[in-house]
């Protein structure tokens, strides 16, 4: 029989006796142990629980406050919000280290999603954005640990990703968002997403049962079948297979799209889907000649799922500062999950140590480094 034992709270009391010397009258007392948040009530385990409940399990702070009240613990939502702010500030050096790691590679995935943000002094919200940048080269046989880096901005202006990627050089796998266009050049190359192309044809096929859309889906499906077969192989192997097998398939698809476009009304949804594919063709086919790249941007879309689920529950961020905090904690939780760590166990371990941890040794607290040293932090199989 499987049973559930509710979690419990405990008060930890630190007793620091004062001692005096009868000869010199000097008074000594042990130093108080450090806390994650200075003069804060919350221990590292409780802080980790609040953070994971909000950003991984999508429980707004007011609901957590109600749950705590049922256990006889009076914790106001504003108190919990202060704890989230204090924890995110404490964890900032670790978040920035992950960010430098993510952007210090050849290829990253990028995407963004809207986040409603409460306007101060008004009863309305504005639309902020959470941006995600993912480093994950495991499909190309790399043993480099995966990581995700979130950034918040109060709008979707093209200058935002330009600021985020100012120090990045390589290939950005992303959708055809116009704000990325000014990034591309000698420093940053574009690799587009076949999943976006496929989705356009899929929506048309579902709504209209179009045989043309079905053929497009079948042709794109053959490209994905090849990708499934070479997943996890080295970049050189992937490149060779793609050039030998996907190359002819892409040429045939390109010719078919051009030919089909001439038979359609320019205002039809099918024509729009075909124009989208053809206008991004160079970026869509870049993966064929580089085994380090992927055929799509699904890695970034997967990273944003947690935000989409959370948004349905907490509805909006309380301020731009709240957006910044969300980006920081999503970075840590997302990277822990990518490295198969229990996010709550990982955050508790970090919060127990980071206040006193040497800043020049912050790498020791990265998820993949802890995973190698402390197997108990790994997710249960």
Image (spheres, rainbow, N blue to C red):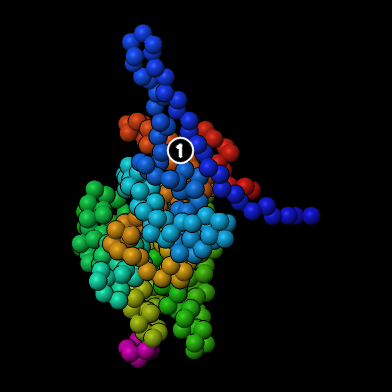
> Closest to the observer: 64 or 264?
64
Q: Residue at x 42, y 60 (%)?
A: 77
Mark 1: few, some, or many residues within 10 Å (few <14, many ≥20)?
some
Q: Quadrant of residue 301?
A: bottom left
Image location of residue 142, percent across then percent down: 46, 44
Q: Residue furthest right?
A: 1
Q: Residue furthest top?
A: 23
Image location of residue 335, percent across then percent down: 44, 49
Image location of residue 291, percent across then percent down: 42, 51
Q: Can you say whether 101 is above or below 196 in the image?
A: above
Image location of residue 121, percent across then percent down: 24, 71
Where disc 1 sits, the SS reads helix
> Closest to the observer: 106 or 278?
106
All told, the count of numbered labels is: 1
Q: Is residue 9 magenta?
A: no
Does the rendering let one see residue 101?
no
Does the rendering let one see residue 321?
yes
Q: Residue at x 43, y 45 (%)?
A: 41
Q: Main secondary structure of the magenta part?
A: loop
Question: Which residue is disc 1 drawn over?
Answer: 352
Q: Is residue 262 magenta?
A: yes
> Closest to the observer: 308 or 228?
308
Q: Residue at x 64, y 48 (%)?
A: 381
Quick check: 321 left or right of 287? left
Q: Can you say which quadrant of the picture contains the N terminus?
A: bottom right
> Closest to the observer: 177 or 288?
177
Quick check: 1 left or right of 218? right
Q: Quadrant of residue 228?
A: bottom right
Query: Which residues, given as a range, are shown in magenta?
Result: 261-268
Q: Residue at x 22, y 51 (%)?
A: 166
């Amino acid at each position: 029989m499987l049973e559930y034992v509710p979690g419990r709270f405990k008060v930890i009391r630190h007793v620091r006796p004062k001692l005096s010397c009868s000869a010199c009258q000097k008074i000594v007392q042990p130093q108080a142990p450090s806390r994650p948040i200075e003069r804060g009530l919350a221990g590292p385990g409780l802080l980790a629980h609040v953070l994971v409940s909000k950003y991984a399990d999508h429980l707004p702070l007011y609901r957590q406050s109600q749950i705590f009240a049922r256990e006889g613990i009076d914790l106001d939502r504003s108190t919990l919000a202060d704890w989230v702010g204090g924890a995110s500030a404490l964890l900032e050096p670790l978040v920035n280290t992950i960010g430098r790691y993510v952007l210090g590679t050849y290829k990253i995935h990028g995407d963004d999603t809207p986040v409603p943000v409460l306007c101060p002094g008004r009863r309305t919200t504005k639309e902020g954005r959470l941006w995600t940048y993912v480093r994950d080269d495991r499909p190309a046989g790399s043993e480099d640990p995966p990581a995700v880096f979130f950034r918040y901005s109060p709008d979707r202006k093209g200058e935002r990703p330009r600021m985020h990627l100012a120090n990045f050089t390589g290939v950005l796998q992303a959708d055809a968002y116009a704000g990325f266009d000014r990034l591309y050049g000698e420093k940053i190359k574009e690799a587009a997403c076949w999943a976006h192309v496929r989705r356009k044809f899929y929506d048309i096929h579902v709504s209209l049962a179009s045989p043309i859309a079905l053929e497009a889906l079948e042709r794109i499906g053959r490209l994905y079948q090849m990708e499934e077969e070479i997943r996890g192989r080295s970049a050189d192997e992937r490149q060779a297979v793609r050039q030998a097998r996907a190359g002819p398939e892409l040429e045939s698809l390109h010719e078919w799209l051009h030919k089909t476009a001439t038979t359609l009304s320019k205002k039809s949804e099918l024509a729009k889907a075909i124009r989208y594919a053809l206008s991004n063709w160079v970026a869509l086919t870049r993966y064929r000649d580089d085994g380090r790249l992927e055929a799509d941007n699904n890695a970034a879309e997967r990273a944003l799922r947690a935000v989409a689920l959370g948004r349905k529950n907490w509805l909006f961020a309380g301020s731009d500062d709240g957006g910044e905090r969300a980006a920081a904690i999503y970075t840590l939780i997302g990277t822990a999950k990518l490295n198969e760590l229990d996010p709550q166990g990982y955050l508790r371990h970090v919060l127990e140590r980071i206040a006193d941890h040497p800043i020049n040794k912050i790498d020791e607290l990265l998820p993949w480094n802890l995973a190698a040293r402390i197997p108990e932090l790994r997710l249960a199989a």
